[in-house]
């Protein structure tokens, strides 16, 4: 269940209000914000998945 939750973050930024807030506050284009946000969300989901799998190996 935790691994699914960690992976569900991947490309979830279309409905994420933080995406639009960062875009408007920083003043970047939608394409630049999309690339940056995609990289951020991918890193979060990969690290979360690795940590959950490592924890399941330990426990």
Image (cartoon, rainbow, N blue to C red):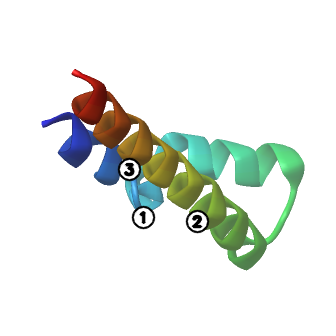
Identified at 36% across, 37% down, the residue is 54
Q: Nearer the viewer, residue 2 or 25?
A: 2
Mark 2, other Cα within 10 Å: few <14 / some 14–19 / many ≥20: some
Helix, strand or loop status at disc 3: loop
Residue 1 picture quarter: top left
Image spot of residue 46 (x, y percent):
47, 54
Farthest residue, direction bottom: 31
- Is 26 above or below relative to 1? below
Note whether 7 is above or below 1 in the view shown: below
Q: Relative to residue 19, is residue 8 drawn left or right?
A: left
User: Which numbered disc covers residue 11?
Assistant: 1
- Nearer to the camera, 3 or 55: 55
Of all residues, the one furthest to the front in this rendering is 58
Earlier sequence position, callout 1 versus callout 2: 1
Q: What element does badge 1 sit on?
A: loop
In front: 52, or 44? 52
Which quadrant holds the C terminus?
A: top left
Q: Residue at x 64, y 69 (%)?
A: 34
Q: Which residue is mark 3?
A: 9
Residue 48 lies, in percent from the top left, at 43, 40
Task: Say whether marks 1 and 2 touch (CB < 8 Å).
Answer: yes
Q: Residues within 10 Å of mark 3 (few under 14, many from 20)?
A: some
Q: Earlier in the sequence, mark 3 or mark 2?
A: 3
């Amino acid at each position: 269940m935790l691994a699914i939750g960690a992976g569900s973050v991947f490309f979830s930024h279309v409905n994420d209000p933080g995406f639009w807030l960062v875009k408007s506050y920083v003043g970047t284009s939608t394409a630049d914000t999309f690339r940056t946000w995609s990289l951020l969300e991918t890193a979060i989901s990969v690290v979360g998945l690795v940590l959950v799998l490592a924890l399941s190996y330990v426990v």
